[in-house]
């Protein structure tokens, strides 16, 4: 992560926010780190755990629809049906 940050910063000299997106929960007892630290070097990054995110963000953006079933939902089958419905709406919109 730090290597990519340094390369991008050298090239563009712009602020960079690094994000790690975890698709599925890790095994029990796994610690999810958000900092890389070695000796005097410390590099922070944001961690997004999809299974903790609201599905609304994914349902409202066609590009993110494939990730919606991985989001938090009390009823996984209902969420999957919502994804299917949104995909059908997109298909109908393209045919018109």
Image: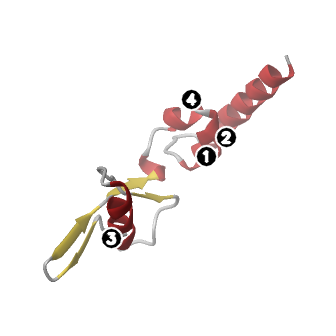
> Residue 87: x percent and y percent?
74, 32
Within 10 Å of disc 4 (Cα), the crowding (few <14, some 14-19, many 20+) is: few
Please tell me which residue is depicted at 66% across the width and 41% down the height of the picture: 77
Residue at which label 3 appears: 2
Q: In this view, does 56 lie to the left or right of 37?
A: right
Q: Quadrant of the N terminus?
A: bottom left
Marks 1 and 2, Cα distance to the nearest angstrom?
6 Å
C-alpha distance separating marks 4 and 2: 14 Å
Label 3 and label 2: CA atoms lie apart by 36 Å
Per the image, the residue denoted by label 4 is 60
Q: In this view, does 74 lie above or below 38?
A: above
Q: Which residue lies furthest to the left in this view?
A: 40
Classed neighbour count for the residue bearing mark 3: other residues with Cα under 10 Å, few (<14), some (14–19), many (≥20)? some
Instruction: Work out whether mark 3 precedes mark 2 in sequence or the reverse, and give the earlier one.
Output: 3
Spatial CA distance of label 3 from label 4 is: 32 Å
Residue position marked by numbered label 1 in the rendering = 69
Which quadrant is home to the C terminus?
top right
Q: Earlier in the sequence, mark 3 or mark 4?
A: 3
Q: Residue 40 is drawn in which quadrant?
A: bottom left
Residue 34 horizontal side relative to residue 69, left or right: left
Q: How far apart are marks 3 and 1 (CA)?
A: 31 Å
Query: Residue 18 at x, y = what percent?
Result: 36, 57
Q: Which of marks 1 and 2 is nearer the N terminus?
A: 1
Tag 1's secondary structure? helix
- Position of residue 65 relative to residue 7, above or below, is above
- Side (left or right) of 14 relative to 83: left
For marks 4 and 1, give the one nearer the viewer.
4
Q: Earlier in the sequence, mark 4 or mark 2?
A: 4
Q: Mark 2 points at which residue?
A: 80
Q: Is mark 4 on a helix, strand or loop?
A: loop
């Amino acid at each position: 992560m730090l290597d990519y940050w340094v390369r991008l910063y050298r090239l563009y000299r712009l602020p960079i926010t690094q994000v790690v997106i975890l698709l599925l929960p890790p095994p029990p007892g796994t610690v999810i780190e958000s900092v890389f630290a070695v000796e005097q070097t410390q590099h922070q990054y944001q961690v997004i755990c999809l299974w903790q995110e609201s599905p609304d963000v994914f349902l409202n953006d066609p590009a993110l629809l494939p990730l919606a079933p991985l989001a938090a939902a009390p009823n996984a089958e209902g969420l999957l049906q919502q994804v299917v419905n949104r995909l059908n709406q997109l298909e109908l919109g393209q045919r018109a």
